[in-house]
Structures are given as C-alpha cells and as structure tokens.
Amino acid sequence: MPIMPDHWIRRMAADRGMIEPFVESQRREGVISYGLSSYGYDARVADEFKIFTNVDNALVDPKSFSETSFVTRQGPVCIIPPNSFVLAHTVEYFRVPRDILVICLGKSTYARCGLIVNVTPLEPEWEGQVTIEISNTTPLPAKVYANEGICQFLFLQGESAPEVSYADRAGKYMGQRGVALPRL
C-alpha cells in the first residue's frame, strides 16, 4: 500500500477536484503551516467551533448525542477549556478516489502543546469537509487558530479498488459540510 507523493496529490487536486480549495505549496510565514507537503496535505481548520461543555450535566452517549453538549463559536481563535475538546471542520472539501484510503495525523506544533487531533480514516469515495476533534489534554486553556494548519492527510493507495466503497453503501457522513455530530 504505497503512500502517494506531492506530484500525485497535486495532479488529483487539479484533475479530479480531490482537495478544494487546494494550496500548491507549504504556507508557514507567521502561521501554523498548511498546504501540499512531500507525502501529504496539511489542511486548515475553519472558523466554526463546537466547544464541549457540561453545563447541563449531560451524559455522552454516541447513540443519542445531544447537541446541547456544545456551545458554537465562530471566529479567528478558539479557546479550548482544560481537559476538554472541540469539534471543528476543515476549510478544504475532500473527494477521495475509489482506490485510496486517507489517514490523518495532528500537527506537531499543536501536539507539543498537549492538543491532540483525532480524525477517523477517510474511506474510498467519501467526500466532504472533514469533522475534526481537537482534545486539550492539559490543565490549562489552549488556543487553536482558524484558517491555519491543524492536521496532515496521508493518501494510501490500495492494491486494488474495494468491492464496496463508502459511496456505494451511501455512508451517513457523505457530502457533509460544517461540523457533523455523531449519527446512528
């Protein structure tokens, strides 16, 4: 399962709209870097944040998730409370080819500050803006900057295309825009 290089990512973005908007090279002057890298693409976090709060003493239940567990904020910066998390989404919209699986890793700048990024794999033929979970593992409030790099996506090519893709089975998160909360 090879990892796909920069020239392949660039071609797929141009020819098939795999990443929109697409940034041709790393941008990093005064910002947390984003754009095309050697073997991946560093995506930006959008300026919409759903900050987890326990004001109502709610139970976290993935089968019956209450949107009231979040406070929505929009702006250039998000402050994540200590030992809490936010849900956000990428600026970029992804269209994954049928023979590709995409995995995501958090940016080292944030990881070194105790902020962990979690994204499940982007399956073959999935498309949408990616919902990102950003956990603050520290006992202090932490800042995240909108429209700057948050994570890196790596594109892995399968030996062959799968028999059934995410699109074939009409996955529940297909075509999402904005933050998508858990669905059953």
Image: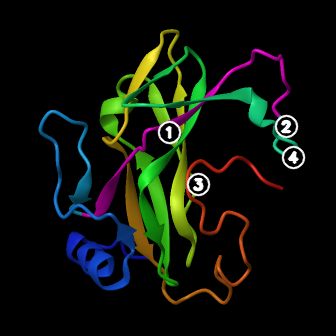
Front tag of 3 and 4: 4
Closer-to-camera residue (127/164): 127
Quarter of the image with the N terminus is bottom left
Q: As displayed, is residue 39 above or below residue 64? A: below
The magenta region covers 39-60
The residue that disc 1 covers is 48
Name the residue tied to disc 2.
61
**Mark 3 or mark 4: which comes first in sequence?**
4
User: In the image, which disc is placed on residue 63?
Assistant: 4
Q: Is residue 23 above or below residue 30?
A: below
Quarter of the rendering containing residue 4: bottom left
| Coordinates of residue 148 in the picture (x, y in percent) | 30, 41
Quickly name the residue at label 3.
Answer: 120
Q: Secondary structure at mark 2?
A: loop
Q: Earlier in the sequence, mark 2 or mark 3?
A: 2
Residue at left offset 74%, top offset 28%: 69
Name the residue type under label 3. Answer: Thr
